[in-house]
Image (cartoon, rainbow, N blue to C red):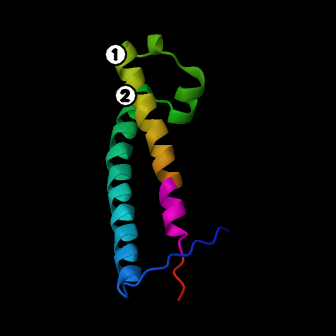
């Protein structure tokens, strides 16, 4: 566990930081929902999970070729990074 200390003269800094972290968690949650819809579209269309797609497929396997491959792969990778980021933010604990 990493400890981070912030020193400031502003008494409301803890609230400001807490609100900023919550706002970022909300933004990430919304982005995850949008991404999941796009990922679900491709998984249903091609009847394969994104994990299998990323591991085994190439652009030639898709009707839309390069553009669909880039779109699906990009969404899947972004979704993974956003989930990781959200878990980090959820793990933040505020102490006095």
Report the front residue among 25 and 72. 25
Q: Which residue is mark 1?
A: 64
Mark linked to residue 13:
none
Report the front residue among 89 and 40. 89
Q: Where's residue 11, x and y in %?
A: 37, 88
Q: Is 86 a magenta residue?
A: yes
Q: Is 49 a magenta residue?
A: no
The total number of labels drawn is: 2
User: In the rendered image, which quarter is residue 9 located in?
Assistant: bottom left
Q: Where's residue 73, x and y in %?
A: 45, 29
**Considering only vertical position in the picture, is 18 above or below 77?**
below
Q: Nearer the viewer, mark 2 or mark 1?
A: 2
Residue at 54 percent across and 61 percent down: it is 88
Residue at 53 percent across and 72 percent down: it is 92
Mark linked to residue 71:
2
Report the front residue among 69 and 9. 9
> Is residue 83 at all visible to an observer of this figure?
yes
**Considering only vertical position in the picture, is 91 above or below 73?**
below
**Considering only vertical position in the picture, is 41 above or below 95?**
above
Q: Which residues are magenta?
A: 85-92
Mark 2 touches mark 1? (CB < 8 Å): yes
Residue at 53 percent across and 61 percent down: it is 87
Number of residues whose C-alpha sits closer than 10 Å to that of mark 1, classed few (under 14), some (14–19) or many (20 or more): few
Q: Is residue 33 left or right of residue 50?
A: left
Residue at 34 percent across and 19 percent down: it is 67
Secondary structure under tag 2 reads helix
Magenta span dominant secondary structure:
helix
Q: Is residue 23 left or right of residue 78?
A: left
Q: Is residue 30 left or right of residue 94?
A: left
Q: Where's residue 43, x and y in %?
A: 43, 33
Secondary structure under tag 1 reads loop
């Amino acid at each position: 566990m990493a400890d981070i200390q912030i020193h400031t003269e502003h008494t409301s800094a803890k609230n400001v930081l807490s609100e900023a972290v919550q706002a970022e968690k909300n933004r990430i949650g919304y982005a995850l929902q949008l991404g999941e819809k796009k990922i679900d579209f491709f998984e249903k269309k091609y009847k394969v999970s994104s994990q299998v797609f990323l591991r085994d497929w190439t652009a030639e396997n898709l009707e839309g070729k390069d553009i669909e491959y880039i779109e699906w792969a990009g969404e899947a990778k972004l979704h993974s990074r956003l989930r990781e980021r959200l878990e980090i933010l959820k793990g933040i604990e505020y102490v006095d």
